Image: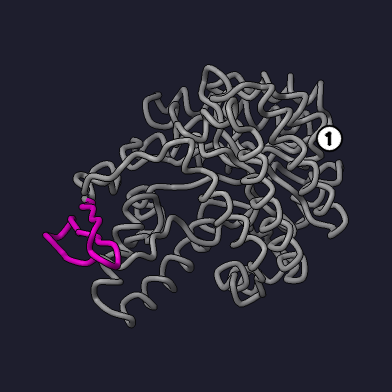
């Protein structure tokens, strides 16, 4: 079997020749060591690299875009993955000023708002370190924001040209691997307290926001299906190790019906709907796994209690991606990494419904020997 056939077997409930692999993401430092050259992948560091490229002009930015795309594909191949992530974190806003090598200033068009962002090369985090003051958004402001999002969704008319990275990746792998197309969304903005407050006080607004996301997602799915992309990723983080950030009743009442609509459309189009969130999602498992119609869950978080055999026993058709802990990779010993990786591979073989891999980013400070333990164990036992 090639990679695409291997994944198709898992999706259709047949036994693959060996366990398919997909790691959610790698930091640039780790990827650079694997590829033997500076790799334009990762999180904040890739956003900083794009800021540098934008600052240096159109030619530099074109070069950056091509390099990050090819490095992403090369990394998937070098690490024996069956599913390609076409591109890493991006930020297309051009800085207004360069303060030093790692620090840029950004400004709004009229100059009334500004922010300064700095890269920490060790952690590869690119964070805002200072910004202008602004009035906090209140729940009363969400009506206008929702109306704007609804207009955008109605006017949105994507074509194949809007997905150049996915199109390039599909052409490059030429049907031999699957390509991860992150084009769906159903998420309450958990990082904005006013939206969490609205789940209780203004559920109508939350529903309208989610409806706009669904409309855009369905439009994307129709275009991607026409491009022969089969694995459509969406969802959005909504849980910690302790459980969902908002009430399971909110998930059931507001999120679930929208997931059903996307899943139904994906089935009509012959593509697969994957929902992503790390954390403990057991409190909403019946809604998410049993009733939403999703084909699979990525960022499956072993450390948060998302146990493959237990999930498979209750939801035998669900495809699971991940389940090797980024935390274990970062803080564990090579022996612990090997043990967790072997456990995941064994569970994948028994269930026939897993793409095994690190469930979140392999962070920049992950010990090299742990990365070697992960890759070598997979190569030996998959």
Q: Badge 1, how many Cα within 10 Å: few under 14, some, many 20+? A: many
Q: Is residue 112 magenta?
A: yes
Q: Is residue 380 visible?
A: no
Query: Mark 1: which secondary structure?
Result: loop
Magenta span covers which residues?
Answer: 96-117
Instruction: Write down the residue under mark 1.
Output: 317
Q: Quadrant of residue 66?
A: bottom left
Image quarter in which the N terminus is found: bottom right
| Residue 20 appears anywhere in the view | yes
Q: Residue furthest bottom?
A: 59
- Quarter that holds the C terminus: top right
The reply, left or right, for residue 95 in relation to residue 171 is left
Q: Is residue 27 above or below residue 109?
A: above
Q: Is residue 16 left or right of residue 38?
A: right
Q: Residue at x 77, y 51 (%)?
A: 272
Residue placed at 86% from the left, 46% from the top? 12
Q: Residue at x 59, y 70 (%)?
A: 163
Q: Residue 212, percent across and down?
A: 65, 52
Residue 249 versus residue 175: which sits nearer the camera? 249
- The x and y percentages for residue 220 are 68, 62
């Amino acid at each position: 079997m090639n990679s695409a056939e291997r994944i198709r077997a898992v999706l259709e409930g047949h036994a693959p020749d060996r366990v398919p692999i997909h790691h959610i993401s790698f930091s640039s430092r780790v990827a650079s060591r694997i590829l033997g050259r500076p790799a334009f992948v990762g999180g904040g560091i890739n956003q900083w690299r794009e800021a540098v490229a934008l600052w240096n002009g159109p030619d530099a930015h074109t070069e950056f875009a091509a390099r990050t795309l090819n490095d992403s594909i090369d990394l998937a191949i070098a690490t024996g993955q069956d599913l390609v992530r076409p591109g890493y974190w991006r930020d297309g806003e051009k800085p207004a000023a360069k303060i030093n090598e790692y620090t840029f200033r950004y400004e709004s068009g009229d100059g009334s708002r500004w922010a300064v962002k700095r890269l920490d090369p060790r952690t590869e985090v690119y964070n805002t370190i200072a910004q202008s003051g602004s009035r906090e958004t209140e729940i009363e402001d969400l009506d206008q924001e929702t109306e704007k999002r609804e207009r955008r969704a109605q006017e949105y008319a994507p074509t194949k040209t809007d997905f150049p990275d996915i199109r390039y990746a599909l052409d490059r792998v030429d049907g031999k691997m699957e390509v991860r197309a992150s084009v769906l969304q159903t998420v309450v903005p958990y990082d904005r307290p006013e939206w969490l407050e609205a789940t209780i006080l203004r559920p109508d607004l939350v529903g309208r926001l989610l409806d706009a996301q669904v409309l855009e997602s369905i439009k994307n799915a129709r275009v991607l299906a026409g491009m022969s992309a089969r694995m459509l990723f969406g969802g959005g983080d909504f849980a910690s190790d302790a459980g969902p950030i908002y009430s399971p009743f909110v998930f059931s009442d507001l999120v679930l019906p929208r997931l059903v609509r996307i899943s139904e459309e994906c089935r009509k189009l012959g593509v697969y709907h994957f929902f992503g969130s790390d954390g403990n999602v057991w409190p909403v498992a019946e809604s998410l796994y049993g009733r939403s119609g999703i084909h699979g869950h990525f960022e499956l978080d072993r450390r948060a209690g998302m146990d493959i055999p237990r999930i498979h026993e209750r939801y035998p058709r669900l495809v699971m991606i991940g389940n090797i802990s980024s935390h274990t990779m970062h803080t564990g010993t090579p022996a612990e990494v090997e043990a967790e990786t072997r456990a995941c591979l064994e569970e994948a073989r028994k269930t026939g419904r897993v793409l095994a891999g690190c469930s979140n980013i392999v962070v920049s400070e992950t010990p090299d020997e742990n990365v070697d333990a992960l890759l070598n164990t997979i190569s030996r036992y998959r």
